[in-house]
Image: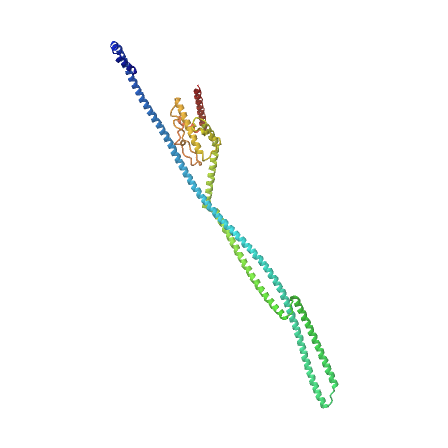
Amino acid sequence: MPRSSKVSNRSFSHGKQGQLNEPIIITLQREIDNYTRKVEIERRKLFNLEQQHRQLQEEVKNKVQSVKKLKMDSIKKVLNKDQAESKSLQFQIDQFDKKLCKSVANIEIMKSNIDIIRKERNQLLQAMKEIEQNHEQIHSRLISTQSQAQRKVHDAQITQQQMFDLKTKNEIDKSEFQEKFDKLKAELKEKQEKQNEKDKISKNNRLKATNYSTFDTGTLLKRRLQRIIANNKEKVKMIDTYQRNMRIIDEAFNQIKEATGLTDIEEIKNNFIKSEEQNYSLWTYVDVLNQEIDALEDNNLELKEKCEIQKKENKERERILSATPDGERKRKQIQRIIDQKQNEINEFSNKLSQIQPIIESILNKMIKTKFNQDHTRVYTFQGGFQLNESNIDQYLAEMEGYINMLVLYKSNKIRRDGLNQNKFITGLLLEEIPTKEFKSKQQLNQSSVLPSQGNEEGQEFQKFLNYTEFHDMAKQALKDVEGQNFASTKKNKK
């Protein structure tokens, strides 16, 4: 195009020379036409190339979109499956939590019932101890009162015996004195009768003497003197008996005075009556105490019977609590579930402790490769690596990302090498790994998800499921990446 413009300018500036050089112009025009024709052809080729380029870009975009769509679909499938599995696991966990809460509530109720029974038993034992202490106190008081009553009864018996002895002695003395008094009275009466007879005889004799004038006074005086002497002797005997009786009575009163300190007869009589009343009151008090002792013994027997009944009830209740079919079965079932879950937890913790060094080594190696886009991630494991149930999902997701990038890198490398493009077109998904539950009964059937092992693709997939082969493949990929990085740095240096 600039060349034609130059020629045209020449033709206009040099008109006269153009007329002379007309064949040159024709040749130039022919060249120009040829050139314009070539330019048009090139333009058409360029337009076709641009259309092809646009078509290729659209195809690439469509392929990228289809790949993204397939990836998103696979991710959605994985997420949906993971969500479904997580929901099912969450539902199972919720059900187990509900059962566990119910079992814990039942256990708490049983514990509260057992605590109530223990408190009642302790209260009954405390009441029994208090009753036994009260019984011992009452028994000691009864023993002391019985000893006091026996001592008082013994003292009363001694005093009563002394009073009875004195009374019998007094009665004997009284009877003896009465007998002696009666004898003396009879003797006096006989003497009086004899004296009366003598007086009558003497009177008759006097009358006769007066009549006969033969009365003798000397004999009469002698007889009177003899009678007076006899009467005096009798009186002396009576006085001696009275004195002897008085000495006996004095001795008795002296004994009473020495024993009681009393001297008055009325006072002695009143004391005797009072002692009799005291003896009667003591006997009544002893009877009351015996009645109280009988009542306390009856109460003790009733309490012993109640204690025996309560012991039997406690044994029956313990037997019922320990031998109830439903309660015992539920308790054993809950205990079995708890033990099983504890064993599963221990098994899971053991598995975590087993896979912890493997995951740590893989993550440390993956972080040092070019697949790691976060360079600060290298410093996360310097403080120590601890694997538990709360962070295992995070580490497994990180490993899954690295594995997907490694598989994509491997597939791109194989595609560049001209091998089969369909071998590693998809990443290693979690849904294609068989999930391992705690129970063998709850393992998910992954036969529909896993590819068959008969073809080559299934064998390649089984390599990813085998830890050693996958570990070797990962090492080889890391070596390839390091070799490429070394080659690129060498080229940059050149």
Image point (51%, 54%), residue name? 306
> Which quadrant of the rendered structure holds the N terminus?
top left
Q: Position of residue 333 (x, y in %)?
A: 46, 42
User: How many dots with numbers?
Assistant: 0
Q: Position of residue 167 (x, y in %)?
A: 64, 69
Question: In the orientation shown, which residue stands out farthest toward the top?
Answer: 20
Q: Position of residue 330 (x, y in %)?
A: 45, 44
Quadrant in the rendering for residue 206: bottom right
Question: In the orientation shown, which residue stands out farthest toward the front?
Answer: 13
Residue 455 in view in this figure: no
Question: In the orientation shown, which residue stands out farthest toward the right?
Answer: 218
Quadrant in the rendering for residue 160: bottom right
Q: Position of residue 340 (x, y in %)?
A: 46, 39
Image point (62%, 63%), residue name? 155
> Which quadrant of the rendered structure holds the C terminus?
top left
In this rendering, the answer to whether 486 lies above or below 279 is: above
Q: Of 171 and 93, which appears nearest the observer?
A: 93
Residue 224 in view in this figure: yes
Which colour scheme appears in the figure?
rainbow
Classify residue 155 as left or right of residue 454: right
Classify residue 409 as left or right of residue 156: left
In this rendering, the answer to whether 118 lies above or below 249 is: above
